[in-house]
């Protein structure tokens, strides 16, 4: 059974109705019943009881995502949440690196003191802490220059800001955010692939797979960089899905009177 994105969204957020100034188009979106006036929802096409939420020329009607556009917006918002969470995590990482750069000596002393405490336990299990790869890696970080760590913290912060800007742009379905997401994500794919050659983990594999799919899906479905007809084909497709555009085309044909079923009143959000 086909999933009805329009009615699902209207059931949660309410209908969106509009009264166009054009008489013929207005008649196709409006009806009078025994319980009052009803107007067609611009999203799901059902009739909703009550006054329209807006009125004016048809070309000034609110843009209401419906059908495939509504499904695409749901996917974009999923990616937006993922970008926002990643951005917040990177901000915390940048803050940790900056704090560490200002207290390397004290952290080094704390680490060595704690290491000596665990020394007898490690010896009991025949584990050589002094030659442990993990311990060696941590000790190497203490030798990094303060300026180097500051640069790393700034770079992480810039990366986090890009992710957060992407998140807000994708949430609102902005085309510039789609371009930014594709370019920024694709730029880091070689680094993610290189990290897999060093060490494979399911988190790295899942992240790489998600990023590759996101780049391909956004670029192709949104027709970026001239793909599949480019922005003109994208705008034509979006206008073709608009209920008002459909009714404008249908208005050229004779209007057939059909019985109107009035659903329960749904408040708009």
Image (spheres, rainbow, N blue to C red):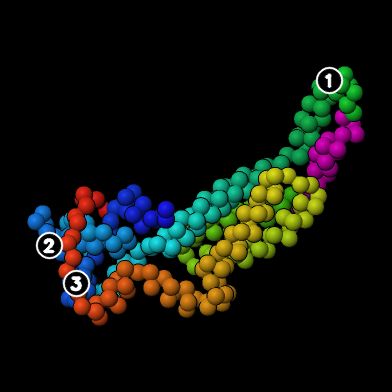
Instruction: Give the residue drawn at x 48%, y 77%.
Output: 233
Residue to which mark 1 is pinned: 121
- Work out whether mark 3 precedes mark 1 in sequence or the reverse, and give the earlier one: 1
Magenta highlight: main SS:
helix
- Residue 52 seen in this snapshot: no
Q: Nearer the viewer, mark 2 or mark 1?
A: 2
- Work out whether mark 2 precedes mark 3 in sequence or the reverse, and give the earlier one: 2
Instruction: Give the residue drawn at x 55%, y 50%.
Output: 82
Residue furthest out toward the bottom? 252
Residues shaded magenta:
129-147
Residue 256 is marked as 3
Q: Position of residue 214 (x, y in %)?
A: 59, 59
- Residue 211 seen in this snapshot: yes
Q: Position of residue 68 (x, y in %)?
A: 43, 63
What is the tally of numbered marks visible in this picture?
Answer: 3
**Real-space Cα separation, disc 2 to disc 1, in angstroms:** 84 Å
Residue to which mark 2 is pinned: 32
Instruction: Give the residue drawn at x 87%, y 29%.
Output: 129
As drawn, is 179 to the left or to the right of 107? left
């Amino acid at each position: 059974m086909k999933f009805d994105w329009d009615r699902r969204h209207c059931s949660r957020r309410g209908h969106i109705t509009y009264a166009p100034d054009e008489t013929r188009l207005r008649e196709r979106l409006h009806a009078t019943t025994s319980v009052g006036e009803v107007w067609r929802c611009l999203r799901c096409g059902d009739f909703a009881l009550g006054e329209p939420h807006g009125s004016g020329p048809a070309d000034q009607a609110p843009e209401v995502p419906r059908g495939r556009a509504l499904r695409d917006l749901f996917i974009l918002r999923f990616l937006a949440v993922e970008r926002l969470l990643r951005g917040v995590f990177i901000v915390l990482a940048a803050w940790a690196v900056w704090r560490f750069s200002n207290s390397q000596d004290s952290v080094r002393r704390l680490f060595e003191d704690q290491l000596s405490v665990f020394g007898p336990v490690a010896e009991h299990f025949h584990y050589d802490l002094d030659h442990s790869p993990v311990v060696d890696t941590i000790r190497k970080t203490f030798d990094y220059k303060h300026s180097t760590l500051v640069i790393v913290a700034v770079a992480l912060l810039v990366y986090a800001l890009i992710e957060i800007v992407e998140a807000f742009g994708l949430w609102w379905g902005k085309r510039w955010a789609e371009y930014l997401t594709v370019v920024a994500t694709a730029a880091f794919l070689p680094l993610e692939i290189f990290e897999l050659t060093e060490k494979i983990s399911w988190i790295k594999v899942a992240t790489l797979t998600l990023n590759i799919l996101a780049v391909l899906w956004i670029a192709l479905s949104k027709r970026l960089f001239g793909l599949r007809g480019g922005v003109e084909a994208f705008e034509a497709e979006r206008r073709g899905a608009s209920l008002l555009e459909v009714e404008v085309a249908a208005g050229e044909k004779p209007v057939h009177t059909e019985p109107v079923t009035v659903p329960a009143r749904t408040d708009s959000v």
